[in-house]
Amino acid sequence: MAIELSFAKILKTLRINNKLSQEELAFRSNLDRTYISMLERGIHQPTISTLFALSKALNIKASVIIQLVELECENKNES
Amino acid sequence: MAIELSFAKILKTLRINNKLSQEELAFRSNLDRTYISMLERGIHQPTISTLFALSKALNIKASVIIQLVELECENKNES
DNA sequence: AATTACTACGGAGTATACTCTACAAAATGG
DNA sequence: CCATTTTGTAGAGTATACTCCGTAGTAATT
């Protein structure tokens, strides 16, 4: 339900689907590796600039990432 | 070009289309009025939680807002 | 002209986004 | 097993997101 947790789950899934390590994703997006780790654990949430940096590194549109987060947020009410 | 500026433009347009004052939008989204002003002037960029709060107050999906930002970013290269 | 919205903008404060360093814990593969 | 890669995590620092107070300027209405 919480946005950070939904985003965390989506981000990790997308990274793994792209066969990238956290370090490689960090390099491609000009972010710190430990920060990527924090995002994937839902400890932090990104700004939209960070979102766009990640989306570029993951070869997916930022708006699609947000769509996935929206879907994930809805489904969190079921379990 | 810059994401903050594109977002700023989109946010102001959406707010005006919804016939809301900055203060009304601030109330609906549980944000500060002066911060809405800063967002619309491109001084700050939101986190995704703030994006979702604004999208709810504006009756539009967060992913659609990001889509509009993407379009605006592309068009910024022409002028 | 005066009143009433509405917005720009300042400063000062708190919370959190984000970086960097370093080390430990897992996980993976040979 | 062992070696390598990968990830979690802590702590300390900087930048910026966000709040709150106030004041001035602008626009619209009467």
Image (tube, coloured by chain):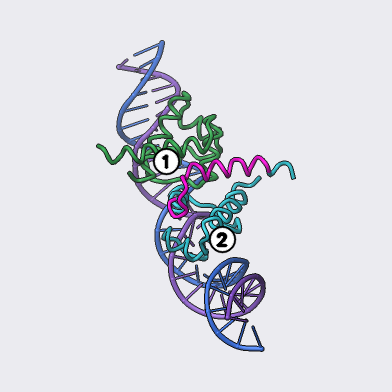
Chain colours: A green, B cyan, C blue, D purple
Question: x, y (%) of residue C21?
Answer: 48, 42
Prevailing secondary structure of the magenta residues? helix
On the rendered structure, is B77 left or right of B21?
A: right
Q: Which residue is mark 2?
A: B38
Q: Amino acid at mark 2?
A: Met
- Considering the numbered disc 1 on the image, is that residue within a helix, a strand or a loop? helix
Q: Nearer the viewer, mark 2 or mark 1?
A: 2
In the foreground, A47 or D6: A47
Q: Which residue is mark 1?
A: A39
Magenta stretch bounds: B56-75
Residue B57 in magenta stretch: yes
Q: Single out the residue that lies furthest toward the right.
A: B79
In the foreground, A67 or A4: A67
User: Is residue D23 placed above or below D15 in the rendered structure?
Assistant: below
Residue A59 in magenta stretch: no
On the rendered structure, is B17 left or right of A79?
A: right
Which residue is located at x 55 percent, y 55 percent? B17
Mark 1 chain: A
Mark 2 chain: B
| Pointer 2 local density, CA inside 10 Å: few below 14, some 14–19, many at least 20 | some
Question: x, y (%) of residue D6?
Answer: 42, 27
Q: Answer with the quarter of the image where residue D5 lies.
A: top left
